[in-house]
Image (tube, rainbow, N blue to C red):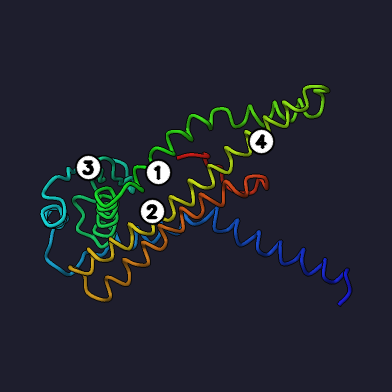
Amino acid sequence: MSTTWIIIISIIAFAVLLCFLLAVANYSYDKFMQSYQELNKRPIRAELGTLDFIGNLNNKYFKNSLQVVQISALAGDAYLKGKIYLSTNSIHQNSLASFTIIAHEIGHAMQDIEGKKLKRLILLRKIGKVLGLIFAPSIIAGLVLLIFGGTLQTVGIALLCCGGGIFLLALFVKLLTISIEKDASKKAVGFLSEILNSEELKLAKKLLRDAKLTYWADFLRILLGWTALSKKSKLFN
């Protein structure tokens, strides 16, 4: 095969891969919300309320130390420092989506008592948000000094390296987030297997996979920002 054909095939392969990654980056959240809405209309077969489900797990694993805080944001459920923030829909809708989301957040609570990985992620995000404020200025000033700085070109290189380091830290935090979310979903499957039948558990696993894909999408939006073809995302969130 000639060098020309190798180059052409490589360009085509790169273009196809780039299109696939951009599709993941731009449409994963919509796919998750579609799955969420579908399962939100499907009540579980077991006669169990969401608050009873939380109470059982709270008593079994946390000595009733978890607190439930009701919020209004749909799909804005989260866990932080012994508190599970659940939307009104998640609390009062006994749907497969609600139980899956709740189990996932309780998975984060389990991570919190098992080790320090979740705490490290929170700390890195706080540090990253501060460093993120100087990311763009560092890149812009670095480029200006590198091009027009003369004797200040060394400073320009240092500023570009600083910006590059912040960018790499952001990618690391995104990958760490993906790992933590995957582990929380694994724990969620364990909780759900106690109350769901095989068909419901299969659907719950699919929803958790779609949710994990949104975190990969966030990583890809940062990585592919140079294309200007992906949705915008913050470096640290």
Quarter of image, res 187: bottom left
Q: CA distance from mark 2 to mark 3?
A: 17 Å
- Say whether disc 1 or disc 2 marks the residue closer to the N-terminus: 1
Q: Which residue is mark 4?
A: 161
Circle 3 residue = 82
Horizontal and vertical percent position of residue 1? 86, 77
Mark 4 and mark 2 lie on one chain; the one further toward the N terminus is 4
Q: Nearer the viewer, residue 172 or 200?
A: 172
Q: Nearer the viewer, mark 3 or mark 1?
A: 1
Measure the alpha-carbon separation of dots 1 and 4. Answer: 23 Å
Instruction: Indicate which label's residue lies in the foreground, 4 or 3.
Output: 4
Mark 3 is on which residue type? Gly
- How dense is the environment of label 4, judged by Cα within 10 Å: few (below 14), some, or many (20 and up)? some
Looking at numbered disc 1 in the image, what kind of residue is underneath it? Leu
Residue density around tag 1, few if under 14, some if 14–19, many if 20 or more, within 10 Å: some
19 on left or right of 217? right
Instruction: Give the secondary structure at mark 4.
Output: helix
Q: Can you identify the residue that label 1 sits on? A: 121
Contact, mark 1 vs mark 2 (Cβ under 8 Å): yes
Q: CA distance from mark 4 to mark 3?
A: 38 Å
Snapshot quadrant of residue 52: bottom left
Label 2, on which residue? 180
Relative to the observer, which residue lies in front, 71 or 58? 58
**SS for dot 2:** helix
Where residue 185 sits: x, y (%)?
33, 60
CA gap between label 3 and label 1 equals 16 Å
